[in-house]
Amino acid sequence: MSLLSIIIASAGMSLGLVGPDNAMHQGMTHEHHGDKECSACASEKGDEKCAMCKAHAMDKDTPLPKVDSALYGNAEWPAHNKGDSLYAKDLQGQAIPVALGNETWISKETKLEGKVVILDFWATWCPPCRTAMPILDQMQKDDSENLAVVAIGGQSEDEDTVRDFLAEHEESINNLFDAKQTVFKKFESQGIPLVVVMSTDGVIRWIGNPHDPNFKPAVAQVLKVDPLINAKS
């Protein structure tokens, strides 16, 4: 990845790094641990549990509802990214070109089915990628029931480097490593960070930079109109 590509991808974007905070629940700081509820939620019932624990319970216990595939075609998806903001191959409106599954999980393996998925292609050596971390981390915390942020490392660095970095930067997003960049190469991106937003049917609805002001609204729109997300609510 050339320095010029990084500059193109990050032009005009803030480089301030802010560490992610733990979720707050009834005045107590806590987080989800493996297959167990957090300490605060373990003594509570129903809707009083935090979003992370409710999402975890749903992943294990609740079958996904059936939805008519035609609803995806009729949904009002966000406007496609265009022009200089789209510095990758335009695959918006198409299924992901290579299915996930050949990557190595660095974080705990998570069920992605039934969720809107954000793929985040990044690297530890990329300043705009690092400054996007708290943005993506907060989005994951805000809606862990319906959204899965999946960071995929492997862009010009080894797995140990990524693991060491993540060990020092606590976050709630999911992390994979792909040394062959199997999925990333299909987007023919001119730079990173690159985020790919997919609806629950695996179709790409938006591609661009996580610092783009249209990114968050695009994700919000996908969550709002996605047929399966609506059927779950």
Image: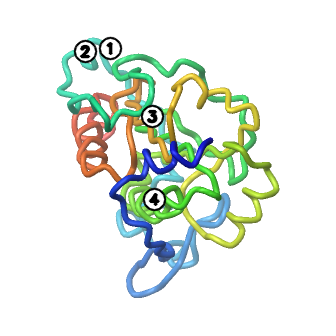
C-alpha distance separating marks 1 and 2: 7 Å
Q: Amino acid at mark 1?
A: Ser
Q: Residues within 10 Å of mark 2 (few under 14, many from 20)?
A: few
Looking at this view, name the residue that lies furthest to the bottom.
27
Kindly report the distance in space between the C-alpha atoms of the residues bearing marks 3 and 1: 14 Å
Identify the amino acid type marked 3.
Gly
- Foreground tag (3 vs 4): 4
Q: Give coordinates of residue 28: x percent, y percent.
A: 46, 85
Q: Residue at x 66, y 58 (%)?
A: 35
In the image, what residue type sits under mark 4?
Ala
Q: Nearer the viewer, residue 30 or 165?
A: 165
Looking at the image, which residue is at 74% across and 31% down? 180
Lateral position of residue 166 relative to residue 189, left or right: right
**Residue labelled with disc 3:** 114
* Residue located beneath label 2 in the image: 73
Q: Image quadrant of residue 206?
A: top left
Task: List the residue tagged with mark 1.
Answer: 69
10 Å crowding of disc 3: few (<14), some (14-19), many (20+): many
Horizontally, is 82 left or right of 35 in the view?
left
